[in-house]
Image (tube, rainbow, N blue to C red):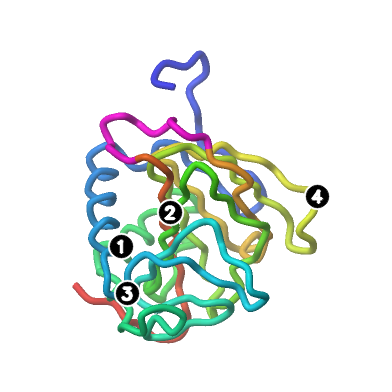
Amino acid sequence: MDAELFPRSRREIAPGAVHVPDWLDADRGRRLLEACREWARPPAGLRTVRTPGGGTMTARQVCLGRHWYPYGYARTVVDGDGAPVKPMPDWLAALGRAAVRAALGPRAVPSEPYDIALINFYDADAHMGMHRDSDERSDAPVVSLTLGDSCVFRFGNTRTRTRPYTDVELRSGDLFVFGGAARLAYHGVPRVHPGTAPPKLGLAGRLNITLRVSGLGSTRKG
């Protein structure tokens, strides 16, 4: 993947949805990975998410700012150890704003701060079904960053979980932002490609860092 005939370039997948390859350089990727490892430690650490129907998500998750559970937000890990959720750091909120600026331009940067991070860890067998990010009170763009193994990211439409959709390969360091008309589009991860992470990163599996504006008030901390 280091030497390609056709270098990857910024691509609009749908109006308001943009893929920016290699947005995180290696140094920023390593720093973000180390932060994710700290956030994943208990209390309020990495957990298995259980759905109301009794199923479990194959990707494990840790939250910052506010804790997401199906289907709402809380200040404590209500479906886990009950500990207070870890704070959303200012530098990560600023990274979200910079990502929107890079993908959609300065006019798309929200006036409210990014105050929630959902960090999902995918092992070789994990996947994510088609869903919408609709539990927020804000329509600010969603920011998605990939570290580690590549995946197939399926980006659909706002009406149905089925076609039409576009499959996008997301690699380590890639940025995907969706807002505007695409803010409530269905999306998912049908598969991960094991062993595709950059060797120097030191990560087996995929981390997806998703940044959102809750519209519920700021919970950030330096």
**Quadrant of the image occupied by residue 98:** bottom left
Question: Disc 4 on helix, strand or loop?
Answer: loop
Q: Amino acid at mark 4?
A: Arg
Q: Residue sitting at 51 percent across and 69 percent down?
A: 49
Q: Provide the residue designation for mark 2.
A: 121
Q: Provide the residue designation for mark 4.
A: 163
**Region rendered in magenta:** 193-203
Q: Position of residue 25 (x, y in %)?
A: 30, 38
Label 4 – label 1 distance at C-alpha = 35 Å
Q: Residues within 10 Å of mark 1 (few under 14, many from 20)?
A: many
User: Mark 2 and mark 1 in contact (Cβ < 8 Å)?
Assistant: yes
Q: Provide the residue designation for mark 3.
A: 44
Which quarter of the rendered picture does the C terminus lie within? bottom left
Whether the magenta-drawn stretch holds residue 202 is answered as yes
Q: Position of residue 2 (x, y in %)?
A: 39, 20
**Quadrant of the image occupied by residue 169:** top right
**Quadrant of the image occupied by residue 158:** bottom right
Q: Position of residue 80 (x, y in %)?
A: 41, 78
Label 2 – label 4 distance at C-alpha = 26 Å
Dot placed on the residue nearer the N-terminal end, 2 or 4: 2
Compare residues 211 and 50 and report the one nearer the observer. 50
Question: Disc 1 on helix, strand or loop?
Answer: loop
Which quarter of the rendered picture does the N terminus lie within? top left
Q: Residue sitting at 48 percent across and 82 percent down?
A: 73
Q: Provide the residue designation for mark 1.
A: 40
